[in-house]
Amino acid sequence: MKLLIQLRTATEMASYEGCALALTLATFGHEVQLYLDAPVFGLLMQPKSRLHGMIQSLELYDMPPAWLPEDVFSGWLTGMLPNDLVAQLTLVPEVIDTQEFEQVLTF
């Protein structure tokens, strides 16, 4: 199953649960793409947050880098994050065709 999981809340618990679901589904062979919206970046900036650590480990789960909106994916933000975290982030495509995903979940 191909899924898009969008993390759109600044709530630490909801972001954690959404990311944990993504990693669990990827473990069972599903294709999962994470989308991190602007409210999530406060959590990413905290090196001890669960979300920060989970995003660093996307490669271990054979997941592609998480998508970031263009207005957030700027040089100053990526310059402030550790390189191992930045390697797991990429700019969201200009057009997201949600039809290519069998399920879209938003947290």
Image (cartoon, rainbow, N blue to C red):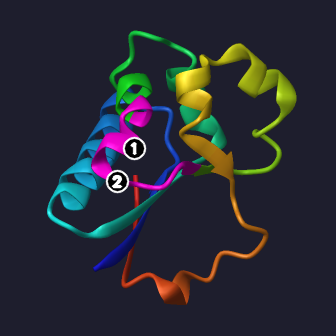
| Percent of width and height locating residue 88 | 53, 39
For the residues marked 2 and 1, what is the alpha-carbon distance in whole angstroms?
5 Å
- What's the residue type where badge 1 is placed? Glu
Q: Is residue 13 magenta?
A: no
At 52% from the left edge and 48% from the top edge, which residue is drawn?
A: 8
- Local crowd size for mark 1, using a 10 Å CA cut-off: few (<14), some (14–19), many (≥20): few
Q: Amino acid at mark 2?
A: Asp
Q: Is residue 64 magenta?
A: yes
Q: In the rendered view, tell whether residue 80 sits above or below residue 103.
A: above
User: Is 40 left, or right, of 74 in this rendering?
Assistant: left
Q: Is residue 107 above or below residue 102?
A: above
* Residue plotted at (50% across, 86% down): 100
Residue pictured at 77% horizontal, 19% vertical: 79
Label annotation for residue 62: 2
Q: Quadrant of the N terminus?
A: bottom left
What percent of the width, then of the height, locates residue 66? 53, 49
Q: Position of residue 82 (x, y in %)?
A: 60, 16
Q: Viewer-proximal residue, 39 or 29? A: 29
Q: Position of residue 96 (x, y in %)?
A: 65, 75
> Nearest the camera: 28 or 49?
28
Asked if the residues shown at circle 2 and circle 1 are in contact, with their CB atoms under 8 angstroms apart, the answer is: yes
Q: Secondary structure at mark 2?
A: loop
Q: Which mark is residue 59?
A: 1
Report helix, strand or loop for mark 1: helix
Number of other residues with Cα within 10 Å of mark 2, as a class: few under 14, some 14 to 19, many 20 or more: some
Q: Residue at x 21, y 67 (%)?
A: 29
* In the image, residue 37 above or below residue 16: below
Q: Residue furthest toward the left? A: 28
The magenta segment: 55-66
Q: Is residue 82 left or right of residue 30?
A: right
